Image (cartoon, helix red, strand yellow):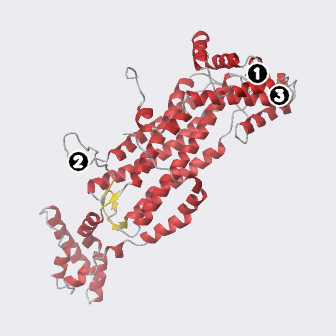
Amino acid sequence: MNDRYQSPLSERYASKEMQYIFSPEKKFRTWRKLWIALAETEKELGLPITDEQIEELKAHAEDINFEEAKAREKLVRHDVMSHVYAYGLQCPKAKGIIHLGATSCYVGDNTDLILMTEALKLVRKKLINVMKELSDFADKYKELPTLAFTHFQPAQPTTVGKRATLWLQELCLDLEDLDHVIGSMKLLGSKGTTGTQASFLELFDGDHEKCREADRRIAAKMGFSQCYPVSGQTYSRKIDSRVLSVLAGIAQSAHKFSNDIRLLQHLKEVEEPFEKNQIGSSAMAYKRNPMRSERIASLANYVMSDMMNPMLVASTQWFERTLDDSANKRLSVPEGFLAIDGILDLYLNVVDGLVVYPKVIEKHLMAELPFMATENIMMDAVKAGGDRQELHERIRELSMEAGKNVKVEGKDNNLLELIAADPSFNLSLDELKKTMDPKKYVGRAPKQVDEFLDEVVRPILKENADLLGVKAEINV
């Protein structure tokens, strides 16, 4: 099928597992499960529906006659009634009770809620696995000093592992949001054309409790604890906005991570995985471009901008429902999930194969460390009999001179040599070099990694041990 548009989300980025959740087959099988749940519930609550009719519906729950449904939709221009018709062709005994009392949103909206919930759980599974890989990386490199940056200017040292905990903490925040939204998902249930359940009140001869019980039973049959207590014809479109907001939050975290990796790869300190036969540039054969991290950033931008779609839909719905949400939902919700799925696969792939270059990290750190050690040097000089205020001014002047040597002359940082040559400090070069142990300047970074992993991350991983073991494969 090379003569028509193909979505890169399915061709290049999203996993088969996520693609299936939003496939026509999954959607229409879910419709049929909902029709079965409705028929069973109505029978249990006293309507004249037979076991034979329900068994007939169950017998054809999976073998959907798509062609008959498509042909019917061309004629009647209504997707739900086309599938009711197609199901009825397969189930002649039950066709009269399919969709009894329901409106289109019974299958359409309930299915959307079911699929989003299932997709959120897949996102959660992949997020947990990214957290596991990041926690292993943080633990492995918790002691390795590295130059930290504020404003992308050299600042006090940290460790490679401590920096990884910053990425990891953002994912912990995303997991909290994700768990809240998953825990809050409910079904629409059987609310009728304007949400009043009037048709079901008629079917159940005015019995309000049976109408309420119908919602409870349908929810239970479809794996939910409850339905939304009130609605118009549709569930509130604010729920779509809430769901996409969580995906956009994960995209923010992934984008931040990808930015850092791209900067570190520029510094040649840490690189994303680069395969043996991978080509970095069509023109420059020596290049190793951070294409996976760049793709994370690109897809993350899409997901964050996609957040606007459900917001606009939710804010402009009229009264009990309008249909200007439909085309937008068909695009924004599945594509948001497909994109975040691709992002998490890339994130997992990158973290799993990160390459760290300790010698380069050490070289960069040692080039800046003399500036950062000046406080310690000054204290040592005071102990040796110097005047603190005078020494502070001399260090300032010598730091400026050393900085000029580095930035203007292109020479190495010679601050230690300048200080050793200044008699006011009364310190030898060997004594000064003893202050150049990077581990003296990382503060509590290694301990912070241990504390964060032990107290926050590992309990999450232990609780979700059954989800671990995912290995991401990227298509291109």
Horizontal and vertical percent for residue 12?
40, 36
Q: Name the residue tied to disc 2.
A: 287
Q: Name the residue tied to disc 3.
A: 43
Return the residue nearer the eye: 81 or 446.
Answer: 81
Left or right: where 396 falls relative to 130: left
The amino acid marked with disc number 3 is: Lys
Q: Name the residue tied to disc 1.
A: 100
Q: Which element type, helix, strand or loop, lies under badge 1?
A: loop
Among the 4 quarters of the image, the one containing residue 444: bottom left
The amino acid marked with disc number 2 is: Lys
Left or right: where 285 falls relative to 146: left
Q: Which element type, helix, strand or loop, lies under badge 3?
A: helix
Q: Earlier in the sequence, mark 2 or mark 1?
A: 1
Dot 3 alpha-carbon crowd within 10 angstroms: few under 14, some 14 to 19, many 20 or more: some
In the orientation shown, which residue stands out farthest toward the bottom? 385
How many callouts does the rendering have? Answer: 3
Structural distance between the alpha carbons of marks 2 and 1: 64 Å
- Above or below residue 134? Residue 72 is above
In what quadrant of the picture does the N terminus appear?
top left
Q: Earlier in the sequence, mark 1 or mark 3?
A: 3
Structural distance between the alpha carbons of marks 2 and 3: 68 Å
The amino acid marked with disc number 1 is: Leu
Q: Which element type, helix, strand or loop, lies under badge 2?
A: loop
Dot 2 alpha-carbon crowd within 10 angstroms: few under 14, some 14 to 19, many 20 or more: few
Q: Are marks 1 and 3 in contact (CB under 8 Å)?
A: no
Structural distance between the alpha carbons of marks 1 and 3: 11 Å
Q: Earlier in the sequence, mark 2 or mark 3?
A: 3
Horizontal and vertical percent for residue 463?
61, 58
Among the 4 quarters of the image, the one containing residue 99: top right
In what quadrant of the picture does the C terminus appear?
top left
